[in-house]
């Protein structure tokens, strides 16, 4: 599955397009990560625990979006966009969407 | 490029787990974690208590003796009670404490031991005990708490558990589950404490009077809202074991030690 | 005994009750969504900006569809437990999935009713509405907004 956040895949032509496909996942941090984060908030620096967490979640969202695209016979998703929003105190939704297309 | 209408597969963006099974797994997992945490915290407290000598305790907590909580009134009943406390203490050889008695002006009958060496009785209790023997058991029970350092334990446990809970869970919506599990675990330990204090109390009564008659008077008069000895659940949640069970334990302990169950009761001055 | 029974029983009853009602509502909603999606299959909805050259566009208008959903007691309780452990909050995923599909459908249907033939440059925004109690920590609802440019072809 080719993913791109441009309108066209550079060097390829889009033959067919199928519509918007989405991938989302809702993840919560756990107590351990939260605790380390509050310590880090005293000294500053990268919150590695959260970085990992959000990375994993974003990967999963992309994977689900590709899954939707695959199920309709597409081989690429263009114009991929991300959106992160908090849905509850301590949980965030990672959302990726794009247009599923077939390129040659 | 051409448009081809297609519908993606259903269910890609939802997890396949059934909500009820997830609920059961989470509840069990969290309860287990909380029980482990509480037991570990209690074990830590046990170790810490061993290192807190009574002299240190008296020094640090002596300021808790505040005239606002209770007082030493001028009446013969109080004087008799204070003298009784002194006599009971003399039967406890390794007593490291300097204990004092104070009265809280409250109608309900209650008694408790406070770090630093003060025993508080409510006015309601002082007025309602029918014999010196009954009061002796109540005081002896509190002496038992001092002997076992229970008052320090409760303080330490309360502190650690509430700190840990608020640090880990605090503010989250699902506080209720950890709180309930903590309360259940705590009350299990608390019952054992009360039973041990009872045993010491009655041994002091025996030492003072040569018999244990009248010691259960206090229990007999405690209002028992959920008094059903088969009511395991309610009595488990209450930190004081149901009175019937406690009375039975007293008598079986007395029987084991062959302490006389009858004898003359000493009255208290009005 | 009755005291303890009421203390534990009422929340359990509430949990179970809202679970049953919530899952019934969810099933009905999903069924309805699937029907409407099937009906609107032929209506192109894409998120790129440049329309295909074959489309002869004679009119365009921005359209939007939005929905605000509330989180039922059971889902909220389950999520609260999950947030102690961490991991995927499955109870919210189905909620957000439904809401998103509903918002996109509303956008499509609005465009269709106004006589347009497709929607391009679709964007989707999600926001949490904080509840006024619990110092703004609770969630009163989640809003999903789907908006894009509806275009009309020359026939």
Image: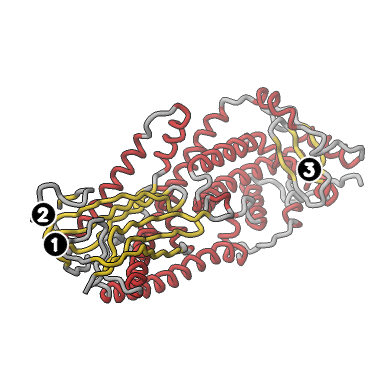
Q: What's the distance in space between the residues labelled 3 and 1, CA to CA?
A: 90 Å
Disc nearer the start of the sequence (3/1)? 1
Q: Is residue C106 above or below residue A39?
A: below
How far from the left and from the top, in percent, is residue A102? 13, 59
Q: Chain of mark 2?
A: A
The answer to whether the residues at label 2 and label 1 have Cβ atoms under 8 Å apart is: yes
Point out the frontmost of discs 3 and 1: 1
Q: What's the distance in space between the residues labelled 2 and 1, CA to CA?
A: 8 Å
Q: Chain of mark 3?
A: B
Residue at the (18%, 61%) spot, across then down = C52
Secondary structure found at label 2: loop
Q: Chain of mark 1?
A: B
| Residue B110 visible in image | yes
Which of the numbered marks, if any, corresponds to residue C110? none
Q: Is residue B63 above or below residue B200?
A: above
Q: Are marks 2 and 3 on the same chain?
A: no
Which of the numbered marks, if any, corresponds to residue B1? 1
Q: Residue furthest left?
A: A104
How far from the left and from the top, in percent, is residue A29? 39, 45
Q: Nearer the viewer, residue B60 or C59?
A: C59
How far from the left and from the top, in percent, is residue A70? 16, 59
Q: Residues within 10 Å of mark 1 (few under 14, many from 20)?
A: some
Instruction: Name the residue tied to disc 2.
Output: A13
How far from the left and from the top, in percent, is residue B19? 37, 63
- Looking at the rendered image, the quarter that the C terminus of chain A falls into is bottom left
Secondary structure found at label 1: loop
Figure label count: 3
Q: Quadrant of residue B207?
A: top right
Q: Residues within 10 Å of mark 3 (few under 14, many from 20)?
A: many
Instruction: Name the residue tied to disc 3.
Output: B121
In the figure, is residue A54 to the left or right of C14? left
Q: What's the distance in space between the residues labelled 2 and 3, CA to CA?
A: 90 Å
């Amino acid at each position: 599955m080719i993913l791109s956040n441009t309108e066209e895949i550079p060097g390829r032509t889009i033959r067919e397009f199928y519509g918007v496909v989405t991938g989302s996942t809702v993840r919560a941090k756990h107590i351990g990560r939260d605790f380390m984060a509050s310590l880090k908030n005293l000294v500053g620096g990268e919150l590695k625990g959260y970085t990992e967490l959000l990375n994993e979640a974003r990967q999963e969202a992309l994977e689900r979006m590709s899954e939707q695209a695959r199920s309709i016979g597409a081989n690429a998703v263009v114009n991929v966009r991300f959106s992160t929003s908090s849905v509850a105190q301590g949980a965030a939704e990672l959302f990726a969407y794009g247009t599923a297309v077939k390129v040659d | 490029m051409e448009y081809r209408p297609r519908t993606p597969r259903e269910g890609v963006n939802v997890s396949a787990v059934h909500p009820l099974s997830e609920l059961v797994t989470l509840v069990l997992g969290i309860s287990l974690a909380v029980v482990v945490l509480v037991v570990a915290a209690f074990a830590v407290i046990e170790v810490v208590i061993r290192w807190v000598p009574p002299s240190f305790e008296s020094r640090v907590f002596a300021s808790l003796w505040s005239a606002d909580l209770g007082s030493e009134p001028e009446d013969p009943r109080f004087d008799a009670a204070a003298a009784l406390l002194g006599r009971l203490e003399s039967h406890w050889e390794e007593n490291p404490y300097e204990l004092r008695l104070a009265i809280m002006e409250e109608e309900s009958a209650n008694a408790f031991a406070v770090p630093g060496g003060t025993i508080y009785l409510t006015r309601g209790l002082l007025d309602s005990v029918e014999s010196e023997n009954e009061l002796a058991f109540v005081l002896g029970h509190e002496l038992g708490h001092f002997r076992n350092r229970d008052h320090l334990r409760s303080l330490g446990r309360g502190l650690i558990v509430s700190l840990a809970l608020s640090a880990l869970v605090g503010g989250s919506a699902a506080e209720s589950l950890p709180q309930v599990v903590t309360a259940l675990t705590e009350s299990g330990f608390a019952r054992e404490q009360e039973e041990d204090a009872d045993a010491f109390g009655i041994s002091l009564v025996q030492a003072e009077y040569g018999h244990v008659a009248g010691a259960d008077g206090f229990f007999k008069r405690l209002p028992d809202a959920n008094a059903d000895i088969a009511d395991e659940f309610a009595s488990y949640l209450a930190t004081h074991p149901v009175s019937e069970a406690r009375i039975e334990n007293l008598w079986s302990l007395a029987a084991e030690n062959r302490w006389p169950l009858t004898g003359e009761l000493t009255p208290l001055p009005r | 005994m009755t005291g303890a029974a009421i203390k534990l029983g009422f929340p359990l009853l509430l949990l179970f009750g809202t679970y049953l009602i919530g899952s019934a509502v969810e099933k009905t909603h999903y069924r309805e969504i699937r029907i409407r999606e099937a009906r609107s299959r032929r209506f192109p909805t894409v998120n790129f900006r440049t329309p295909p050259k074959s489309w002869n566009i004679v009119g365009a208008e921005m359209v939007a569809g939005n929905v605000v959903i509330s989180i039922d007691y059971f889902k909220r309780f389950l999520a609260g437990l999950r947030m102690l452990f961490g991991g995927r909050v499955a109870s919210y995923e189905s909620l957000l999935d439904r809401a998103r599909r509903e918002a996109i459908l509303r956008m499509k249907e609005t465009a269709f009713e106004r006589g347009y033939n497709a929607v391009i440059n679709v964007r989707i925004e999600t926001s949490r509405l904080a509840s006024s109690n619990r110092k703004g920590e609770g969630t009163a609802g989640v809003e999903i907004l789907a908006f894009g440019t509806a275009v009309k072809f020359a026939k």
